[in-house]
Amino acid sequence: MKFSVFQVSRQGGRQINEDRMGYCYTNGSGLFLLADGMGGHPEGEVAAQLALQTVAAMYQKEAKPELPDIRGFFSTAVMAAHRRILRYAIDRGLSDTPRTTFVAAVVQGNVAHWVHCGDSRLYFVRDGELLARTRDHSYLEQQHGDPSVTIPAMAEANRNVLFTCLGSPAKPVFDIAGPVPLQQGDKMLLCSDGLWGSLDDTDIVFHLGQKPVSVATPELVELALAKAGAGSDNVTVVAMEWETPNAFEETRGNVSTHQMDDEVFASTVQAGLGEADDGDLDDAAIERSIAEINAAIRRTASRKY
Amino acid sequence: MSKVKPSPLPPDTVIGGYRIVRKVAAGGFGLVYLAVDPDGQQVAVKEYLPSSLAARAPGELLPQVLPEKLALYRLGLKSFFEEGRSLAQISHPSVVSVLNFFRENETVYMVMNYLEGAALQDFIVTARELKQSKVFRESTIRSLFDEVLRGLRIVHQHKMLHLDIKPANVFITDDNKAVLIDFGAAREVLSKEGNFVRPMYTPGFAAPEMYRRDASMGPWTDIYAIGACMYACMQGYPPSEAPQRQDKDRIAIALARLRGVYSDNLIEVVEWCMALDPLSRPQSVFALQKELSREGERRYTKLTVAEKVRMQFDNIVSDKQKPSAPTAPAGKPR
């Protein structure tokens, strides 16, 4: 497996950068991630970080070296990330939960899959043409091309408002796409709304189609920041280019996994906010906890200090 | 969202074989009742019923959890279990003990020994109203914290930290025993560092590292809180918040003012416990116990007139919100 990858996150005029990005890979599979912590709720950057960590940790556990079931992985990993954020809010006693958008792509076995929740996007470009793009979970985007979708009066005022994300008390809505067979030179770009809010799709596709990702990515980010001016949102992009091994001259910043052992796992996702958790408590887990505690009480009572 | 607090279980309700006598406390996690077990023994029963997530109509037994809050409600249970797990491992007169844990009414209950008395917090408030130079006598402070530290040492031996030690969580029983209560924030952390989420903190008693995401916590974190509790027993008021101390540390000044009232050794112990740098504090409860129990005549160094004047001056300046004037080193009158 061979691909080149480039990622960059730039703080706009905002107080903090709540965007998080990263990628990890084994010798047979690659995962690309991006999350944009939401303002208006506490600790968006924590939600974004937890989402990345949780999904990356599950990926590391399951990609040995390939994921056996990519769609299944996306479903469980996204829900695990969601619950991880809720648990964080509970443990901290936060009155409101941190929230984040999320987009991720997996390439393995010469096909791509992706999942998204909210308005962080994935652009799939082949030969300078936009082959696919995620549709945001906003009223505006979902109505697009479908006049039967009615927009609630509240959302009419700001049609970019999202109706789903990770970390909200409501169960997240997410869409999984794929498999899409990969060809030499195919490019996938994951970005926060800081990029597409400032640049048109045509600009993004044009730049991405013309140059290697290591050139196009920083250029696009600078362009978006310049266009949005002093009040720019944070702009974060992870872009990858698929390369058929030895079919073409190498681009810069490439990753070749052929030399890697099966056990090797590489990741740019930083750990640090506590490990991914086992998630929800079901009835059996509650009974087990109670039994454990009572056993501990009996043990302690029989022991003398 | 309902702002209505969940109704307590009515008196004489029997749950898990315990008969409810009355509600004694309510917090964010739920309710605490005085109850009697089948042998007529008094117990405290803590009911998991977070008011922000669940409601209960008067006279009802079952809580109503809104469907969209169910996931959070279940997750909150984990913290409740955490407290049960922590306490279940410890049996010590200075640590509240858990007797039973059971599930009923679609929620869970923790049975603990019932303590009669009042929180240290209440004693401090009462004592400071007397407006005397000493809030508590020094011998009282020493023996009180000797007991608390015995309990805390056991907690640390079980690789746990309390992380919310404050006068409201130190209970003084009617037979004059100090007992550490409320392990809601406790986490088994010493064995698995980095794998835990930071709990909420109480301003004034929380060590500076509790405000930071990257810092490591340890026995020294609880020891800071112990120092802050001792400070509150001497001063009558909680110390200023750790982050404020980084800018201008009023604690050293406040403690200096207590010279001559409390022994130099006690003041030094509090300063040691409350050092902003975790490494400058006693690193273990044992080290602190050793210092606190040191025998020997107590030395009292009264403030000199010059120091008093300078303090007065410092006060006036700070009252006017101006930067404080530099003062000469303490103890060397000009």
Image (spheres, rainbow, N blue to C red):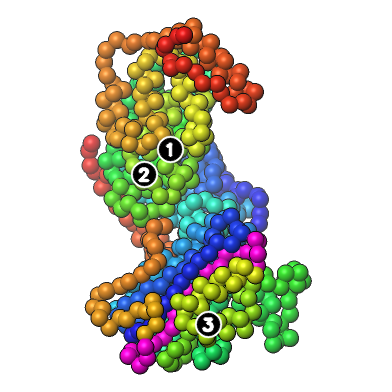
Mark on residue A184?
none
Q: Could you classify mark 3 by the number of other residues whose Cα lies within 10 Å: few (under 14), some (14-19), or many (20 or more)?
A: many
Q: Position of residue A131 (x, y in %)?
A: 55, 90
Mark on residue B207?
1
The residue under label 3 is which amino acid type?
Leu
Q: Is residue B261 above or below residue A22?
A: above
What is the chain identity of the residue bearing mark 1?
B
Side of B158 relative to A120 (left or right): left
The residue under label 2 is which amino acid type?
Met
Side of B323 relative to A30 (left or right): right
Q: Position of residue A123 (x, y in %)?
A: 54, 82
Instruction: Please name the residue that numbered disc 2 is placed on.
Output: B217
Q: Nearer the viewer, mark 2 or mark 3?
A: 3
Determine the CA span between mark 2 and mark 1: 9 Å
The residue under label 1 is which amino acid type?
Ala
Q: How many marks?
A: 3
Determine the CA span between mark 2 and mark 3: 47 Å
Q: Nearer the viewer, residue B93 or B113?
A: B93
Q: Nearer the viewer, residue B56 or A191?
A: A191
Magenta residue span: A228-249
Residues marked 2 and 1 touching at CB (< 8 Å): yes
Instruction: Please name the residue that numbered disc 3 is placed on.
Output: A208
- Which element carries disc 2, helix, strand or loop? loop
First of labels 2, 1 by sequence position? 1
